Image: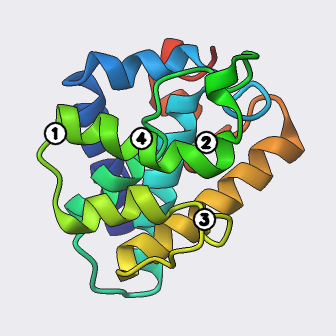
Amino acid sequence: MERDYENWAALLFCMRVVRHNPRLAATALNRQHGDTSCLLHSVAVAFYSARLARALGLRVRMSALVRGALLHDYFLYDWHEKDASHRLHGFHHPRTALNNAGRDYVLTPVEQDIILKHMFPLTLQPPRYLESLLVCLVDKGCSLYETAVRRNAYPSLRPLMPSRLCRP
Ligand SMILES: [Fe+2]
Ligand SMILES: [Fe+2]
């Protein structure tokens, strides 16, 4: 019961951040992997990072963990579209996401590190904080899972979110 409450609290926090940022909500229109929207991917990374931290009994800055995870892919374009500016997306999008997030939010150092380091080891600088390491690991797990299942990923998470936010 307590765990259910914590899961709901993490998800409600995600939805509150999304509701207050139309740019973040609009990332529901962009595809990430398979038929998972960029927004659902980010919510899943935030949700499962929070759950993993709780499951392992880790002392984390939960608000920074969830906010950083929600903004880790805040690059605000569809990387599947052929465009010269999207080349080497894997290497460049953490910096683009950090620049966009820094424009729209006052970010803590932990949140900045989460966004900038989440593609490690593709980008060379390792995560500095426990929260960044968690998001870096969970992002990889979520990305592999979304790529493997292709359709209707996160069947337990989708019904808890407005359907328009789940699929591009
Ligand atoms: Fe990313
Ligand atoms: Fe990601």
3D distance between C-alphas at marks 1 and 2 = 30 Å
Q: Which residue is mark 3?
A: 123
**First along the sequence among labels 3 and 4:** 4
Q: Which residue is mark 2?
A: 156
**First along the sequence among labels 4 and 1:** 4
**First along the sequence among labels 3 and 1:** 1
Q: Is mark 4 within 8 Å of ligand 1?
A: yes
Q: Which residue is mark 1?
A: 105
Q: Nearer the viewer, mark 3 or mark 2?
A: 3
Q: Which residue is mark 4?
A: 97
Q: Residues within 10 Å of mark 3 (few under 14, many from 20)?
A: some
In the structure shown, which secondary structural element does the residue marked by tag 3 occupy?
loop
- Where is residue 101? Give x, y as percent: 28, 39
Residue at image coords 38%, 87%: 57
The answer to whether 74 is drawn above or below residue 132 in the figure is above
Q: With 126 as the anchor, is 155 left or right in this view?
A: right
